[in-house]
Every structure is written in C-alpha cells, then in structure tokens.
C-alpha cells in the first residue's frame, strides 16, 4: 500500500512527517509526499495513495483531501499535534474536519473535543532509530540543559545555575549559555547523551511534548519535568520514571539532590527508559491503521 504524507516542514531534518515516514516504512508501506516549505515532492514518483496522511495541514488547500479522495478513492487522515487552545487551532479543526475521514489529536484536552469531532487521541512518541543510547565514549560534558523554544512560563529556566539552553526566541539577556538555534536528530541526541539532567516544561500542559519521550528513550540523562494532561495515561509514574516538580522554585533543589546522588538518578533513568519502550512512532502508526481496519 502507498501512503502519501503531507507535512508543512519536511525540509527540516526533524519533524513529525519524517518520524511517520520512518514508521510506515518500517511497517512495509511505500511512502511519498510533498513539502509545503520547499514546494517539492519527495519519495517514489508516480504512486497513487491508498492513504493520505496530513500532518497539521496549515497552508494546505482545505479542498485537497476531498479532491484527492474523489480522484484516488484513498482514505484521508489528519493528525494535528498542537494544543487546541493555542491560537485559532480549535477554529481550524472545526473548519477542516469535514475533509477528513479520520482525525487524530496529540492533545486530548478538553476531553469533549474527541467526541465532538469524532477524533482519537494519538500522543507524540519517539523514533528508536534516532533516540537511542549513543556510544559510551560520548561522555557527560554538562550538568543541566533544556531543549526547546522560549514560551511564557519558561523564564525560570534561564535562572537555573549552570544551565545550557538550546532553542529559539529566548531573551538575549539570559544569564546563562543560550544557543540560539534549533537542534535536531543526532545533534539533539548528543545533547541528551552528554547532559546529566534535562529540564522540561510543558507549554499549556495539554499533552506530553516529544522531548519528554525522546529523553526517556535515550536512557542517558535524568529527566526533571512538570506534569501534563494525559501523561499518567501513558503509564508514566512521577518520581519513578522521571523527577516531578509542581512548582518551578523546587527545580534548583532537585537538580542539586540528583547531581549529588548518582545511584538515585540512574535508577530513575532506568525506570524511565523501560516505561517509554511501547511509545514509538511505529506503534502510533499501527493505531492509525487499526482505526481503519487494516
């Protein structure tokens, strides 16, 4: 079977489009698609889709899935990864829902949305071909790091002693080392590998972000994170699989505690690496296929 994947940022080296491309290929499907950013097709040419998978879909002609289904008789799927309360996302879902036979949301809050729009919850995951322990000779070079874009509520991260921040839009008045760049794939994996403690903060707390699962899957750095909606539903237990903070002012003490007790940190890392095993993008792709009866 052929799967056409439409993603807005496939030109970047790390996107959901890439992860689902890897996942469906591992399940034996032919994949191809179109990148809105570069206006180029990728993958095998001349294929007729059996499934059209649109990731996010912003910028895509709303009639495209309808016309593609009419032309090819394919199944049409929209996967939307962003919180519905962020911007006009709810309005967007309402406007385009009729063009897709299947709708999957990475953020299931508020819960009534799933029933109202006939959607299924499909949280983010990790790609085991990318997020895996690197060779042992790649050693720890920093105590604390954060990977992600600056958002409201993340200001406390800038004030953590000794932290290195990798991401865009951070204020340049940060007292600590900020790398004003996005990091992807092997570069991000190496940051996880070479850092003793990774800090996470969820934006809007409406679903797990991908950095949480990637960090746990690497199994090489301790994750200190707030909680988020749906995280426990995935089987993760706070203070067993990751170190939980309910208030940002607790984070400095937690950093000191786990830097000083390496055995305690390693135990949490091992638990987290085991708990995250089922949550691959291949498993998420299988959910999409099951929903279609395939």
Image: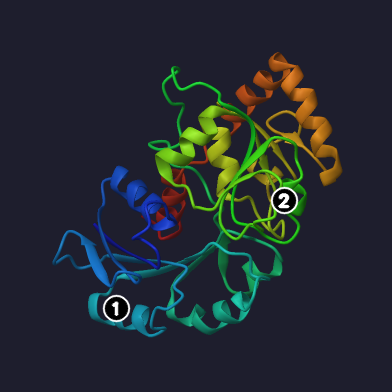
* Residue 48: image location, x then y, percent: 20, 68
Give the residue furthest to the left. Answer: 46
> In this view, which residue lies farthest toward the top?
263
Residue receiving disc 2: 228
Q: Nearer the viewer, residue 81 or 247?
A: 247
In the picture, the disc for residue 90 is none
Q: Nearer the viewer, residue 42 or 152?
A: 152
Looking at the image, residue 198 lies above or below residue 74: above
Residue at (34, 81) in percent of width and height: 64
Numbered mark located on residue 68 in the image:
1
Q: Is residue 215 left or right of residue 49?
A: right
Regarding mark 2 in the picture, which secondary structure is present there? loop
Identify the residue shown where x is 54% and y is 55%. Answer: 122
Residue at 71% x, 46% y is 175
Task: Judge the density around disc 2: few (<14), some (14-19), many (≥20) Cα neighbours within 10 Å.
Answer: some
Q: Residue at x 60, y 31 (%)?
A: 275
- Front-most of residues 202 and 90: 202
């Amino acid at each position: 079977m052929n799967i056409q994947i439409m993603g807005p940022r496939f030109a970047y080296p790390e996107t959901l489009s890439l992860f689902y491309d890897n996942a469906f290929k591992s399940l034996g499907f032919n994949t191809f698609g179109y990148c809105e950013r570069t206006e180029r097709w990728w993958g095998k040419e001349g294929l007729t889709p059996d499934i059209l998978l649109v990731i996010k879909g912003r910028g895509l002609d709303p009639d495209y899935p309808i016309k593609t289904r009419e032309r090819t008789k394919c199944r049409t799927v929209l996967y939307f990864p962003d919180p519905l309360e962020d911007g006009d996302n709810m309005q967007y879902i309402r406007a385009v829902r009729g063009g897709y036979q299947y709708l999957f949301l990475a953020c299931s809050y508020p819960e009534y949305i799933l029933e109202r729009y006939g959607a299924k919850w499909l949280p983010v995951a990790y790609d085991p071909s990318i997020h895996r322990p690197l060779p042992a000779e790649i050693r720890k070079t920093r105590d604390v790091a954060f990977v992600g874009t600056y958002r409201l509520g993340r200001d406390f991260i800038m004030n953590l002693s000794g932290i290195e921040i990798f991401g865009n839009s951070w204020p340049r008045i940060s007292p600590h080392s900020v790398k004003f760049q996005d990091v992807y794939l092997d570069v991000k994996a190496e940051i996880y590998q070479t850092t003793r403690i990774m800090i996470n903060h969820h934006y809007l707390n409406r679903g797990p972000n991908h950095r949480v699962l990637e960090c746990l899957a690497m199994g090489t750095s301790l994750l200190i994170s707030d909680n988020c909606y749906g995280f426990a539903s995935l089987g993760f237990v706070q203070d067993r699989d990751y170190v939980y903070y309910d208030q940002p002012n607790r984070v400095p003490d937690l950093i000191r505690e786990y830097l000083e007790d390496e055995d305690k940190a390693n135990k949490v890392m091992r638990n987290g690496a085991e708990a995250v095993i089922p949550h691959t993008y291949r498993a998420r792709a299988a959910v999409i296929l099951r929903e279609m009866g395939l």
